[in-house]
Amino acid sequence: MKLSVIIPVYNEEATLGEILRRVHEAGVHEIVAVDDGSADSSWSILEDSSAAIPELKLLRHETNRGKGAAIKTGVAHVTGDVVIIQDADLEYDPAEYRAVVGPIEAGRSDVVYGSRILGGNPASYRRYYWGGRLLSTVTSILFGQRVTDQHTCYKAFRTQLLRSLPLRESGFGFCAEVTALLLKKGVRIEEVPISYHPRSVGQGKKIRWHDGLHALRISLKHRFTGLRKD
């Protein structure tokens, strides 16, 4: 299967060059990097990297629209059979792509999440860890399927399935929305353990407490509107 990687980029000049190198070394079909209106040198780094990485495709938002918007832009341009999301920091290891997409390649699942919880990894802050656990537990209860790490970056999908979802969230709400839409549709999400190297707010971590409240609203909205189609 051809694997496409979508990298949303927003002000990641400190880590962008290194993550591009690591993704390139993972031997994927294509890398679709979407600069989401960065105000630093991220776009210049992407342009410079494209000369050395032939599978790198560059897209750009003139203004910052959010992670979800960048992912949706990327999804419209990928050509692989399977797509995985990659943050532009160094919290996740591209060497683990094959472990994440393995269940899809084996025909066991159409969606796989790389779970930091199953991997027994450290957390950058207790509030992020327990907030994520709470949101994942609520989602599991609402939709009747256990999900341990709803907000993991490493989500792999069959491309056509991801394109079929009516995604509307532009920011970090993407994770809650895509999970709710899949579970409401009756799609089984398989999880595999992954490693995780958390960074601090000072190092560039962008998600905040109010993003968690928004994620909760999204899950509740999707659970109690419309009917599940099995």
Image (cartoon, helix red, strand yellow):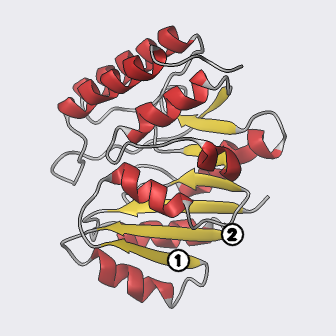
Q: Secondary structure at mark 2?
A: loop
Which residue, given by chain and number where applicable, does mark 2 sit on?
A: 29
Residue displayed at 58% across by 52% down: 84
Looking at the image, which residue sits at the far left? 202
Q: Nearer the viewer, residue 168 or 130?
A: 168
Q: Secondary structure at mark 1?
A: strand
Relative height, residue 112 to residue 70 (above, below): above
Residue 90 visible: no
Label 1 and label 2: CA atoms lie apart by 11 Å
State which quadrant residue 230 falls in: top right
Q: Where residue 208 sits: x, y (%)?
A: 20, 37
Residue displayed at 44% across by 20% down: 136
Looking at the image, which residue sits at the far front? 226
**Disc 1 residue type (three-letter):** Lys
**Disc 2 residue type (three-letter):** His
State which quadrant residue 161 falls in: top right
Badge 1 crowding class, 10 Å Cα cut-off, few under 14, some 14 to 19, many 20 or more, is some
Relative horizontal placement of residue 194, taking residue 109 as reference (left or right): left
Q: Nearer the viewer, mark 1 or mark 2?
A: 1
Q: Where residue 163 sits: x, y (%)?
A: 61, 50
Residue displayed at 46% across by 50% down: 92
Which residue, given by chain and number where applicable, does mark 1 sit on?
A: 57
Tag count: 2
Q: Where residue 108 sits: x, y (%)?
A: 81, 33
